[in-house]
Image (cartoon, grey):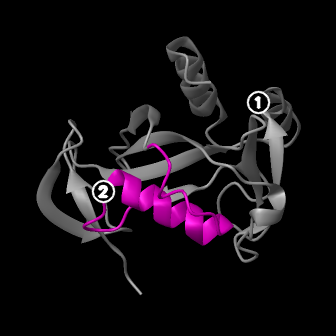
Amino acid sequence: MSEIVDIYDRNKNKTGETIDREAMLKPGQYKMIVIALVENMEGKFLVSKRALDKKWAAGQWEVPGGGSMAGETSFEAITREVREETGLDVSGCEPHIADYYFNDDPVEGDNYFTDIYHLKLDFSIEDVTPDEKETLGAELVAREDLEKLNNEEGFLHFDRINTALKKDEERGYL
């Protein structure tokens, strides 16, 4: 089944056009991706290990996230992705975007921007129901352990996540 996504411009505004998620984008066209740093009340972050049969970054650590679907806002997309991947409901969280970045790939036409959310939620690991088709399980880890996981096994988007957390620290959000 094909998924349809909105096309955005460099200012993160919808152009009014849609496209199949797998189709190549032209220069200046972008898809929206969202990822979430879900932090519990003890200051630990929810991470999961990607399934070994993933075609990209198999066995690496990651935070919840994925692509938006046509018609979704950024916060609607991250709420859906977190629920699908972890069973957690973050819809009542402050929709705090810690950072964002653009990816331009003129060869593959894989242009996107990624909103990095930092969401604080009262939960424990027992509340998490990881998607077993997508992951090898989930853990709660302290901020300093994110770098350790990256160094030992790889962590998707680690540098971007680290930058977002540093910005939140400077803003007093941590």
Distance of label 1 from label 2 (alpha carbons): 28 Å
> What residue is rendered at 76% in x and 30% in y?
143
Q: Observer-nearest residue: 24 or 170?
A: 170
Q: Observer-nearest residue: 121 or 65?
A: 121
> What residue is rendered at 70% in x and 54% in y?
57
Q: Which quadrant of the rendered structure holds the N terminus?
A: bottom left
- Whether the magenta-drawn stretch holds residue 111 is answered as no
List x then y, in percent, for residue 139: 83, 52
Mark 2 is surrounded, within 10 Å at the Cα level, by few (under 14), some (14 to 19) or many (20 or more) other residues, namely: few
> What residue is rendered at 48% in x and 60% in y?
79
User: Is residue 142 at all visible to an observer of this figure?
Assistant: yes
In the rendered view, tell whether residue 166 sits above or below residue 38.
above
Quadrant of residue 160 in the image?
Answer: top right
User: Is residue 108 at all visible to an observer of this figure?
Assistant: no
Identify the mark at residue 143; answer none if there is no mark.
Answer: 1
**In the shown orientation, is residue 39 left or right of residue 13?**
right
Element type at marker 1? Answer: helix
The magenta segment: 68-94
Element type at marker 2? Answer: loop
Mark 1 or mark 2: name the one nearer the start of the chain.
2
Q: Amino acid at mark 2?
A: Thr
Residue annotated with mark 2: 73
